[in-house]
Image (cartoon, grey):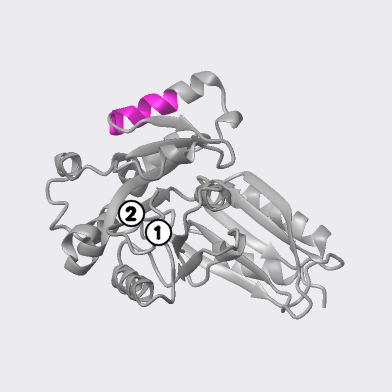
């Protein structure tokens, strides 16, 4: 990795994978690694509010969050603008970085994102698309690949496939998942990743993106910029500055998973729990839920709960009303 602050082109890694695969966990692993490189991170959230910025390790990295749509369609112009602004700040010395990592929303088709580095002249002259890294949730991969075109695209365009959550399934199931992945993409190496632990040298500066190989997969790659999401998949946010009752919120989550678990593609949140001085972080995919104690609330910080739900045909009004009933009045 170059130590020269203005070396170009600047390598860019696209980090993708379906909802809940473990992209942010991997990104935190990269940011925590002592590789000596300054990284600009572009975060994309699908929905009206994002919380991944709060889940990321905060250091010297420049983190730009895009949460007003999917990076591969409605905000693609914003990506071009942000990359241009980062380049300008780097050139005038107000920002220092040697590489860029773009973490896409779990519903993104990586093709239009990759296109940006070939069809936008100013971007292609300043940046180099190094690789597309796709994290695959081994527990849910087979169903996600069957039900969601985006999941297939993420695997098909990958230069590296990282298989997460292999500890939750049997060796025979892992073999079935790997067989399915190789049927979609035979050229990308597959490696297991546990809570983001992987060899950084295998995912950064690998010069893995091969345009000729991509054109074999999708001949109109450089022309076709269309992309549509499943109309049944929506997202919404619950936000409140009232503290939540711990017992009630746990009961709500139990009912939610029982009634809507199959349709909950992704849910995550930072909760303000009554009596706790720390943020409580919830993250889940379908029926799998993890909660951890996050950082302490700062003295001057507004304490609020923010929960993001992404799913298929979810009863938004019912879920929001149930959450309201968990508030401590």
Magenta stretch holds residue 180: yes
With 255 as the anchor, is 164 left or right in this view?
A: left
With 273 as the anchor, is 133 left or right in this view?
A: left
Q: Is residue 309 above or below residue 154?
A: below
Q: Give the labeled residue for mark 2.
A: 11
Figure label count: 2
N-term-proximal mark, 2 vs 1: 2
Q: Could you tell me which residue is drawn at 44 percent across and 39 percent down?
A: 201
Q: Position of residue 211 (x, y in %)?
A: 18, 45
Q: Taking the image as drawn, is residue 254 in sight?
A: no
Q: Position of residue 203 (x, y in %)?
A: 41, 41
Q: Label 2 crowding class (10 Å Cα cut-off): few <14, some 14-19, many 20+?
A: many
**In the drawing, what numbered circle is on residue 98?**
1
Where are the magenta residues, as a range?
176-186
Asked if marks 2 and 1 touch (Cβ < 8 Å), the reply is yes
The answer to which of 68 and 215 lies nearer the viewer is 215
Mark 1: which secondary structure?
Answer: loop
Q: Is residue 286 above or below residue 105?
A: above
Q: Label 1 crowding class (10 Å Cα cut-off): few <14, some 14-19, many 20+?
A: many
The answer to which of 37 and 118 lies nearer the viewer is 37
With 24 as the anchor, is 290 left or right in this view?
A: right
Predominant SS of the magenta segment? helix
Quadrant of the drawing holding the C terminus: bottom right
Q: Position of residue 83 (x, y in %)?
A: 33, 69
Figure quadrant of residue 104: bottom left
Mark 2: which secondary structure?
Answer: strand
């Amino acid at each position: 990795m170059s130590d020269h602050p203005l070396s170009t082109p600047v390598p860019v890694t696209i980090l993708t994978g379906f909802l809940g695969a473990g992209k942010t966990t991997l990104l935190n692993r990269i940011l925590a690694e002592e590789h000596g490189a300054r990284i600009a991170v572009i975060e994309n959230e699908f929905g009206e509010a994002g919380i991944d910025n709060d889940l990321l390790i905060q250091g010297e990295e420049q983190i730009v969050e895009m949460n007003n749509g999917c990076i591969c369609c409605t905000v693609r112009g914003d990506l071009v603008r942000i990359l241009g602004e980062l380049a300008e700040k780097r050139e005038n010395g107000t920002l220092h970085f040697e590489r860029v990592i773009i973490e896409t929303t779990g519903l993104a088709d990586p093709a239009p994102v990759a296109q940006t580095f070939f069809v936008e002249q100013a971007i292609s002259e300043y940046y180099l698309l190094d690789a597309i890294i796709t994290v695959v949730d081994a527990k849910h991969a087979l169903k996600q690949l069957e039900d969601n075109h985006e999941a297939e695209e993420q695997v098909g365009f990958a230069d590296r496939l990282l298989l997460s959550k292999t500890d939750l399934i049997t060796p025979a199931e892992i073999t079935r998942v790997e067989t399915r992945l190789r049927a979609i993409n035979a050229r990308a190496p597959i490696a297991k990743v546990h809570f983001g632990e992987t060899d950084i040298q295998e995912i950064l500066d690998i010069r893995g993106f091969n345009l000729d190989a991509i054109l074999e997969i999708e001949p109109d790659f450089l022309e076709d910029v269309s992309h549509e999401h499943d109309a049944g998949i929506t997202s919404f946010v619950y936000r409140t500055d009232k503290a939540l009752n711990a017992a009630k919120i746990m009961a709500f989550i139990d009912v939610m998973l029982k009634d809507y678990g199959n349709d909950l593609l992704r849910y995550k949140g930072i909760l303000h729990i009554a009596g706790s001085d720390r943020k409580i972080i919830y993250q889940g995919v379908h029926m799998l839920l993890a909660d951890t104690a996050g950082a302490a609330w700062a003295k001057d910080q507004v304490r609020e709960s923010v929960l993001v739900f992404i799913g298929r045909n979810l009863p938004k009004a019912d879920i929001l009303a149930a959450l309201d009933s968990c508030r401590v009045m």
